[in-house]
Amino acid sequence: MKLKLWQAGEAVLRRRARALTPEQIRSDDVQRLIEWMRETVRDAPGVGLAAPQVGVSIRLAVIEDLPEYIEKMPPEEAAERNRVPIPFHVVINPELVPEGPETVEFFEGCLSVAGWTALVPRAVSVRVQCLNEKAEPMEIRAQGWYARILQHEIDHLNGVLYVDRMRTRSLATIENYMRYLRHATPEELRAALGVPAEDY
């Protein structure tokens, strides 16, 4: 079943979601929600979906980066982003810790901010403690694009959208990003966005 994707402006996207107990995680309702979220994120298509994005304020997100998504990108672009396929999995009640001070900026979009994209700085490496769909403890160590996906989805569980973290002058429609910004060098980006080098 494809679920409705809630858009920015809905209160559920701005609340800290509630944690789930192991019994709730294993319930038929939550297991059914996980399957529906899997169908919804694939249909979108997207690489992650948090429960608040479908109107359910619980600390649960699904993540999957399929090979066919990455194959559509130029190989050098995928390598620059350190983007590799990620099998479908569920993170519940996650706690995220950046590993080291290093950050990187790439354009990021969101299924709940449809039609827009912006540069967002994110930690390069993260560690996440969470539960899986069986309520079993799990630790994830992630780098590159996978780390970005985790940060983006866990932000949703805390009522945070990427627009809260973006470089505001970089906000663009998807159409204009594809037309002007997708292949721009950092210097070209600065010029296109009218940002002095020392402020970028």
Image (cartoon, grey):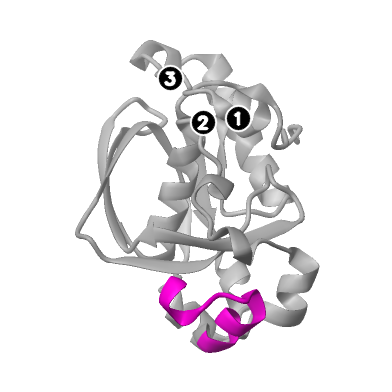
Neighbour tally class for label 1: few under 14, some 14-19, many 20 plus, Cα within 10 Å: many
Q: Residue at x 31, y 34 (%)?
A: 130
Q: Which residue is tagged 3?
A: 25
Is 51 located above or below residue 155 in the figure?
above
Instruction: Write down the region rendered in magenta.
Output: 187-200
Quadrant of residue 49 in the image?
A: top right
Judge from the rendering whether residue 128 lies leftward or rightward of residue 183; answer left or right. left
Q: Residue at x 76, y 55 (%)?
A: 115
Q: Which residue is drawn at 73% across and 76% down?
A: 178
* Image x and y of residue 100, in percent: 19, 59
Q: Nearer the viewer, residue 116 or 43?
A: 116
Placement of the N terminus among the 4 image quadrants: top right
Q: Which residue is tagged 2?
A: 159
> Residue 4 magenta-drawn?
no
- Helix, strand or loop at disc 1? helix
Mark 2 touches mark 1? (CB < 8 Å): yes
User: Predominant secondary structure in magenta?
Assistant: helix
Q: Nearer the viewer, residue 136 or 145?
A: 145
Judge from the rendering whether residue 159 lies leftward or rightward of residue 99; answer left or right. right
> Residue 198 magenta-drawn?
yes
Q: Residue at x 69, y 54 (%)?
A: 45
Extreme residue in the right direction: 175
* Image x and y of residue 91, in percent: 40, 37
Cα distance, mark 2 to mark 3? 21 Å
